[in-house]
């Protein structure tokens, strides 16, 4: 953990810079430049935006809802966000491990639920069910024993799962 402090600080710095400072700075810069270099020099645009304050108000009233809609489309309607998420899982072994673990947890939870339901009805598990349980146990044991942070077992599972 101690050797990662500079990298963590660098990450926090980049997030603060890009998410807050650069965003605000770029917004103010864009509004200022577009108004004073473009709108002030064209009488037609000057009539639409008589002052910098009018320009800001119109940009906020039109631009903010438009950008919210574009962000919504990016996350909910376009395939680009799914591609970004896929790349994130492929490149981040910790996030990928959580995903793979949750998939195995679902399989195990389902199998346990089936067993509990059957046992609560005072029924015994048949040989086929016991064989499935042993096969699942063997598969999971092999996966856990062969899996390391660097050998890409989680990535192989992820690519076959999706």
Image: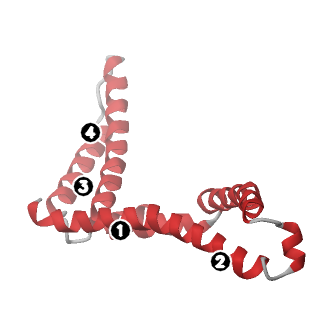
Which badge, 2 or 3, is on the more N-terminal residue? 2
Q: Which residue is mark 3?
A: 139
Question: Relative to 151, is 98 above or below?
Answer: above
| Left or right: residue 124 compared with residue 16 | left
Please name the residue shown 40% across and 67% down the image: 17
Q: Can you give x and y, in whole percent of width and height, for residue 135 in the image?
A: 25, 50
Q: CA distance from mark 3 to mark 4?
A: 14 Å
Q: Which residue is mark 4?
A: 130
Q: Can you give x and y, in whole percent of width and height, for residue 130 in the image?
A: 26, 39
Secondary structure beneath disc 4?
helix
Q: Nearer the viewer, residue 87 or 31?
A: 31
Which badge, 3 or 4, is on the more N-terminal residue? 4
Image depth: mark 2 or mark 4 in front: 2
Assess disc 2: are there few (<14), some (14-19) or many (≥20) residues with their C-alpha within 10 Å of its C-alpha.
Answer: few
Image depth: mark 3 or mark 4 in front: 3
Q: CA distance from mark 4 to mark 1?
A: 53 Å
Camera sees residue 162: no
| Left or right: residue 42 compared with residue 27 | right
């Amino acid at each position: 953990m101690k050797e990662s402090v500079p990298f963590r600080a660098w990450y926090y710095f980049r997030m603060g810079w890009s998410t807050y400072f650069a965003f605000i700075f770029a917004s103010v810069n864009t509004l200022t430049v577009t108004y004073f270099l473009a709108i002030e020099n064209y009488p037609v645009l000057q009539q639409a935006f008589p002052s910098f304050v009018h320009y800001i108000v119109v940009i906020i009233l039109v631009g903010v809802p438009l950008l919210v809609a574009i962000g919504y489309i990016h996350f909910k309607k376009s395939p680009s966000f799914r591609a970004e998420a896929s790349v994130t899982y492929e490149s981040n072994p910790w996030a990928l491990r959580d995903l793979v673990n949750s998939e195995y947890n679902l399989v195990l939870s389902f199998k346990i639920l089936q067993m509990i339901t059957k046992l609560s009805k005072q029924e015994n598990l048949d040989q086929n069910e016991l064989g499935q349980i042993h096969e699942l146990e063997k598969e999971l044991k092999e996966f856990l024993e062969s899996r390391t942070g660097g050998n890409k077992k989680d990535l192989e599972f992820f690519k076959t799962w999706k």
